[in-house]
Image (cartoon, rainbow, N blue to C red):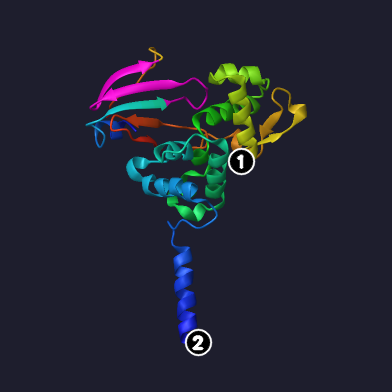
Amino acid sequence: MTMQILFAGLLFMAQAKPNAVPTGLNANERKVLEYLLKDWGEEYSVTGVDIAMQASGMEPSDVTRFRIGDYIKKHPELHEVVRQWGWQTLVLNVNEKLIARAIVNAERDKQSPPSMADLSRLVGVPENEARSAVGMLDRFGILKRNKSAGGVGYVAAEPRYVNWTPWLDFQFHRMTLSSGRILNTN
Amino acid sequence: MLSLVSDKLSSEKVTVEDSSPDGTARIRVVFDKGQFVEADPPGTIVFIGGG
């Protein structure tokens, strides 16, 4: 009985280890997460999943990025950086952050909502990339569909995203070093 | 970020991609060994130092 209790206690401690990478992701996805767990906090790093995928030698993939990002969203116990700065700034790429700003800042300032053509022009990406970015923001639950809103037909899913500037959510300071390292800082 | 550029990363050439939170315009600033090199768009005002 004593041994069973001791074993159960050790198992609990192992599961509660803050930086442990639990199951639920495939080997390549775990490799990306392990990269982030080592990178976060170094030089004030709040590096995102897209950068970690690139550094880990993975091809860009919104599907994979969403799987890893959704995992981070659901597991704030992974690292202090997730809890301190929020999962939003870690899972979105630069284009998605700029698209989010264009939509929610217009909502906040009670301006006409941007169309997809407006988003394309404002962020400097083709319309298909703007559409993908809106789709990703929807999948992460940052934007929600509202056809009566006009424009692209999306609004902020929570009040937090309308007045987002106290958080890092849609900010980025992306640094590329001559040594080859790429990181986001807070 | 600028303290990083001039301290821990002072042996590096560092390219910073940024944007003002109130807009969607992209800003790119380059530093080499802690020294400002260039900014794009060229009219970007870069505050360096303090005190």
Task: Say if the magenta span includes residue A148.
Answer: no
Identify the residue at the far bottom of this view. A1
**Residue A88, relative to residue B49: is it above or below?**
below
Name the amino acid type tagged 2.
Met
Task: Note whether residue A82 is visible.
Answer: no
Residue B40 in which image quadrant: top left
Density class for disc 2 (Cα within 10 Å; few <14, some 14-19, many ≥20) is: few
Percent x, y of residue B21 = 50, 27
User: Residue A121 versus residue A105: which sits nearer the camera?
Assistant: A121
Return the residue nearer the eye: A88 or B21.
Answer: A88
Q: Which residues are magenta?
A: B18-40
Location of residue A65 in the rendering, given as x and y in whole percent from the top left corner: 53, 40
Q: Is residue A3 above or below residue B19?
A: below
Q: Which residue: 37% across, 45% down?
A: A39
Mark-to-mark CA distance, 2 and 1: 45 Å
Q: Residue at x 58, y 25 (%)?
A: A129
Q: Residue furthest right?
A: A148
Q: Residue A130, which numbered label?
A: none
Residue drawn at (24%, 35%) of the image: B7
Q: Is residue B21 magenta?
A: yes
Q: Is residue A169 visible?
A: yes
Placement of A186 over or under A77, stated as above or below: above
Could you tell me residue B4's position as x and y percent? Answer: 29, 35
Q: For residue A128, which quarter of the picture?
A: top right
Find numbered disc 1 in the image and state the secondary structure of the residue it sits on.
Answer: loop
Circle nearer the N terminus (2, 1): 2
Disc 2: which residue:
A1
Report crowding for label 1: few under 14, some 14 to 19, many 20 or more residues within 10 A (C-alpha). some
Task: Name the residue that disc number 1 marks.
Answer: A140
Q: Please, which chain is the residue tagged with disc 1 on?
A: A
